[in-house]
Amino acid sequence: MSVRQLHPWDVTPAQAIEIQKALAARVVREDDLPPINRLGGVDVGFEDGGRTTRAAVVVLGFPGLEHLEVAVARRATRFPYVPGLLSFRELPAVLDALARLATWPDLLLCDGQGIAHPRRLGIASHLGLIADLPSIGVGKSRLTGRYREPGPEKGCWTPLCDGDETVGAVLRSRTGVKPLFVSIGHRVSLGTAIDVVLRAAPRYRLPETTRWADRVASQRGRKKSTDHD
């Protein structure tokens, strides 16, 4: 499998915003995915004071969540830190890591946003389009939108709305803990995204894909903030 070259990476922040606006219209918000046997988890950290991007991709079996494969890639960090544009800073290294996998996952869970983004193209949607893979955004915090607090039990959720549009779900993945912000990345409906995230988080707040990828991306590096992607 290979990635699609949808745009250059050597761009200015203003150019990156225009690319996001153009690509957002290509995101598929309905289920278009194969049988899910392998879940991918994506996370990014930084080394050398931010000069080096370290990307980790882990693959777990589904629904058993057994660890199958991991790939790590490093790249010089070329794009500045700009809230809302983190995919331009991080995805080149993520794509390198994906290319090192023996077998790609059937579905990606990204530590960040999908369409729950001011321009509807967070890192999960951006990566899903470029890799042509179904993807889900699983954010630890809200980037955009308004919501009511969901009920306290695991599985409770409320819509995350921006204007008149539902852009995600505020999901209680574990009873009594802070909710997650789940959104469509690409080729997945919101209902499927909620179901997969819950099944991928049997014990903890975060899906096992995120927990594994976070461990790898954090090694010898400084973890990124995921609040603004």
Image (spheres, grey):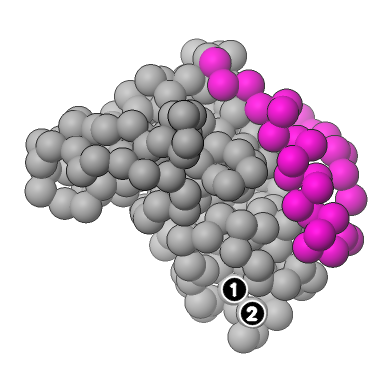
In this orientation, which residue lies closer to the viewer: 156 or 111? 156
Residue 108 shows in this picture: no
Pointers 2 and 1 in contact (CB under 8 A)? yes
Q: Which residues are magenta?
A: 1-30
The three-letter amino acid code for the residue at tag 2 is: Gly
Lateral position of residue 121 relative to residue 211, left or right: right
The three-letter amino acid code for the residue at tag 1 is: Phe
In this orientation, which residue lies closer to the viewer: 215 or 70? 215
Residue at image position (59%, 73%) is 46
Residue annotated with mark 1: 46
Residue 116 shows in this picture: yes
Please identify the residue farthest to the front as the structure is shown. 163
Q: Position of residue 91 (x, y in %)?
A: 69, 53
Residue at image position (41%, 36%) is 161
Is 207 above or below relative to 104?
below
Q: How far, Cα to Cα, is label 2 from label 1?
A: 5 Å
SS class, disc 1: strand
Q: Position of residue 49 (x, y in %)?
A: 62, 85
SS class, disc 2: helix
